[in-house]
Amino acid sequence: NAGVTQTPKFQVLKTGQSMTLQCAQDMNHNSMYWYRQDPGMGLRLIYYSASEGTTDKGEVPNGYNVSRLNKREFSLRLESAAPSQTSVYFCASRTAGGGYTFGSGTRLTVV
Amino acid sequence: QKEVEQDPGPLSVPEGAIVSLNCTYSNSAFQYFMWYRQYSRKGPELLMYTYSSGNKEDGRFTAQVDKSSKYISLFIRDSQPSDSATYLCALLGGSGGSYIPTFGRGTSLIVHP
């Protein structure tokens, strides 16, 4: 099925560990985004990539890095996980003039 | 003051009721307005997308935009238990002409049989 695929769906990390969240879309969208969603805080933009080869910081970029590997893939890396990064992470993609298509999310717990 | 305000609810209604979900915003530069539905433990999915004042209808859903009042609404007719979800508004075209949407925090809707 066409859409946005995120892996893994669940992850538990120890404080200080690193990991990469993967995202791929097969809709030929130019723009891709990483959000985190926390209770009472709504969706907050971490990083985005307006097109292949470009990335920009969003509202809450500290503690994260991203890579736009090609037009399809946009990964999010936590270099040294902290309990404050416990959240649900969503990847999304968008075509110009269109709405967002979201993935099903990654539930991350940092202990 | 946040750019987009949305009452978190929960809003509890009986099956068959007409539901009204609302967002207010402060930045008159917003030009595009979206509504997303998010079921528990799922990603948001796009319901409605409009870029003008007035009404847009899609089945049981009607999106209404009043730019003069900076107020947008989503109406659900004949609500069903399957409509129970969180509804998020998202606005595009804010300060500086940004096309990064600003999301409301979402309203939780419960439709009970």
Image: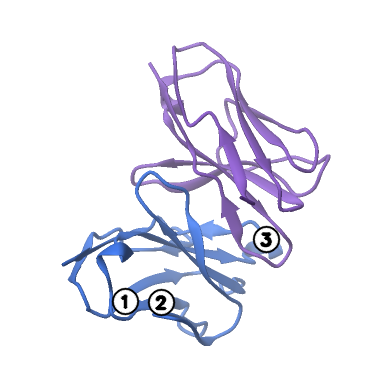
Tell me if B39 is positioned left or right of A63 in this view. Answer: left
Task: Determine whether A35 is above or below B25 in the image.
Answer: above
Disc 1 marks a residue whose amino acid type is Ser
Could you say where residue A103 lies in the image, as x and y percent from the top left? 55, 45
- Res B20 label: 1
Disc 2 marks a residue whose amino acid type is Ser
**In the rendering, what colour is chain B?**
blue
Q: Nearer the viewer, residue B37 or A110?
A: B37
Q: Verify CB contact (< 8 Å) between mark 3 and mark 1.
A: no
Q: Secondary structure at mark 3?
A: loop
Tell me if A73 is positioned left or right of B70 in this view. Answer: right
Q: Verify CB contact (< 8 Å) between mark 3 and mark 2.
A: no
Q: Secondary structure at mark 2?
A: strand
Q: Verify CB contact (< 8 Å) between mark 1 and mark 2.
A: yes
Q: Secondary structure at mark 1?
A: strand
Which residue position holds label 2?
A: B73
Q: Nearer the viewer, residue A65 or A26?
A: A26
Of the residues under marks 3 and 2, which one precedes in the sequence?
2
Which residue is painted at 50% across and 43% down in the image?
A104
Say yes or no: labels 3 and 2 on the same chain. yes
Q: Nearer the viewer, residue B98 or A109?
A: A109
Of the residues under marks 1 and 2, which one precedes in the sequence?
1
Of all residues, the one furthest to the front in this rendering is A1
**In the rendering, what colour is chain A?**
purple
Which residue position holds label 3?
A: B99
Which residue is painted at 38% across and 58% down in the image?
B106
Task: Determine whether B33 is above or below A42 in the image.
Answer: below
Q: Classify residue B19 by image quadrant.
A: bottom left
Which residue is painted at 42% across and 28% down in the image?
A86
